[in-house]
Image (cartoon, rainbow, N blue to C red):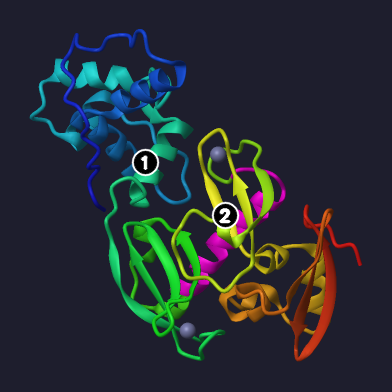
Amino acid sequence: MGRMALVIEEVSPGMDTQDQDVPDAATAASKSFKMVGNQIRAQILQALGDARGPQDAPPVLSFSKLRDVVSSEIDSGLFNYHLQQLVGHYVHHSDEGYQMRPAGMLLYRTIQAGTITGELTIEAFSIGVDCYRCGGHIEANSSFGEFWIQCTDCDTFYDMVMAPPRGIETTDTDELLTRLDQYNRHKHVAYLRGICPICMSPVEQDLKQVDAEPYNRAHTRQVHIHWSCHHCGNRRFASLGMALLETPAVISLLEKARIDPTERTVWEFEWAMTDHTLEVVSEDPSVFSIDIEADGNFTTLRISDDLQVLS
Ligand SMILES: [Zn+2]
Ligand SMILES: [Zn+2]
């Protein structure tokens, strides 16, 4: 396993001070980073996380065992000082020793996923679907946690997914596409139900004309759904079809045609990747129609701007 590389600031005993004259959010962020912004603290969290088996409760390590795992060369007093900084929020202390708390495991897993420090880049590969615009070559590519789907012939940009870098570290591209698709779509379900999949706050959902998208990318779509979280700044653009794919109305429609929507990636549904079957029926109130293709048959759904199926 990779070692924690979260060394933001070397903190010596006695140097921790209360942040003053800064807003609450900035104080919380400063405290959070400072809490683990030291190599010894990061190593302690890494050791406690590594010690846990996949099916076991977090183990309790005695002080001497934990110090041995991290490094017996670290001065005992210095080691204890940094360990005590973690006790409370990240680490539980009992007579038996030290045990990771859920917040500590969450931080450990986030770092193991490469979300914070990962810089993994993979070589582009074909997703096995022809471009819906030009018939050309759609490729998947990835850099610094961004994973995007784009036609290399006409530049049409189909999708962008934020993926934990360690999760895309594989040579089995079919299996990778399946995992990426499911990882992304489970987030869509959360957004559709009004929840931010990052911080669990309420999200706003609205439909935007393509001109309103802030990214300069070549699209074939007229309309985007935009989900945004005002608490953590998380945001996501998706096509109307991508969102509808996770709704009961469309799932049941596909199942009637004996299509399991979980066995295909979203990129294989033309009505989800393009606006080729989408029409704006009225603008005030906003009503759209979209033809959903299932096994060669088309069903027209009329959709309100809050994604309710009208007919
Ligand atoms: Zn193309
Ligand atoms: Zn959020």
Query: Residue 82 at x, y = what percent?
Result: 24, 20
- Magenta span contains residue 188: yes
Residue drawn where x is 10% and y is 21% of the image = 75
Above or below, 134 relative to 203: below
Image quadrant where residue 252 sits? bottom right
Residue with the mark numbered 1: 108
Query: Residue 157 at x, y = what percent?
Result: 48, 71
The kind of secondary structure element at disc 2 is: helix
What segment carries the magenta color? 176-196
Q: Which of pointers 1 and 2 indicates the residue nearer the eye?
A: 2
Image quadrant where residue 216 sits? bottom left
Query: Residue 172 at x, y = what percent?
Result: 39, 78
Q: Nearer the viewer, residue 143 or 212?
A: 212
How much space separates mark 1 and mark 2, taking CA atoms? 37 Å
* Residue type marked 2: Ala
Residue with the mark numbered 2: 212
